[in-house]
Image: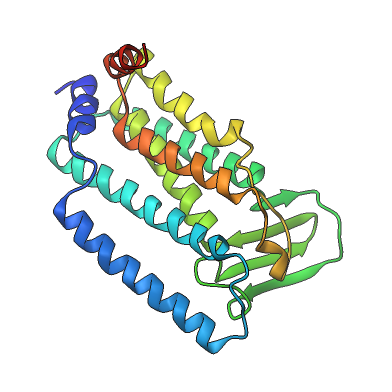
Amino acid sequence: MTASGTASRTGSRPLLTRDALVAGGVLVNTELLALLAYFVLSDAVPYRPLVYVYPFVWLNVALWGVWRVRQARRVSAAGASTRRRAVAGALGVGYLLALGSVGGLYAVGAGGPDVGPRLVVAGLPPGWSPALLYTGGGLTLALVSFRVVGYAALAYLLAVALVDTRGPAALGPCLVGALPLLAGTLGGFVGDGAALVGDGSYALSTLVFVLAVALLVRRPTAADLARLGGWVR
């Protein structure tokens, strides 16, 4: 089976299945219980409800995207060479590092006093917690759970898309992967404690993230775009 054939079959499969909906329902209920426990056990006041929703959107969409692609590849696995897989993997790692830098998960050469690694759990809501914070030796880290999972999912989806496509068709995944970078992965931060929560640009960054995942999973073809253009006209 050719790479283009694989991409086409992957894109033609339904984005949601009954199993995915059932698993998603269980996951959402678990997240709601975790959020309820957080408010009961802490003194937090939900002054901005969406702040508590964004992490779950990132986590759930990331898990769905990876699950969806892995399910599709079980049906139509591409016979890519080891070299192509290695190149795609390297590009995926580089993409993850770029997202982390632009999105504020880490900063090299940042100033500030040296502070050892600190794992924040109790002070942050579910999804934001746990967060690993570190400053020292010219390196600053703010590894927040949902951001790390989201960026890792994007890197994985981009690498898989590059494995499944070749030639000019590989330009599509690259352009889609550039969306979060072009948007500056809005809402990036390198901060401490409560400063990690409350950036108003998370609405737009979440929208960009969801769109990028959906496109990397669906992988629209030139024919899909042509049909979309016809509908618009």
Quadrant of res 87: top left
Name the image quarter holding residue 195. Answer: bottom right
From the viewer's perspective, is 221 left or right of 202?
left
**Where does the image place residue 177, in percent across and percent down from the top left?**
48, 32
Asked if residue 113 is positioned above or below residue 45 in the image, the reply reads above
Q: Please state the total of marks drawn on the protein image.
A: 0
Image point (20%, 46%), residue name? 71
Q: In this view, does 211 lie above or below 54?
A: above
Q: Position of residue 39 (x, y in %)?
A: 53, 82
Residue at image coords 67%, 66%: 133
Which residue: 14% across, 23% down?
1
The quadrant the C terminus occupies is top left
Q: Is residue 193 left or right of residue 75?
A: right
Q: Which of 16 and 232 is in front in this view?
A: 232
Please tell me which residue is depicted at 60% across the width and 60% down the height of the picture.
143
Q: Can residue 31 be seen from the camera position used here? A: yes
Q: Nearer the viewer, residue 112 or 147?
A: 147
Relative to 78, residue 58 above or below: below
Q: Where is residue 33 in the image (x, y as percent from the top left)?
A: 39, 78
Residue 31 left/right relative to 97: left
Look at the image and tell me whether residue 85 can be seen: no
User: In the figure, 232 relative to 19: above or below?
Assistant: above
Is residue 220 toward the left or the right of residue 51 in the image? left
**Residue at the outermost bottom position:** 41
Most extreme residue toward the front is: 233
Residue 117, by quadrant, is bottom right
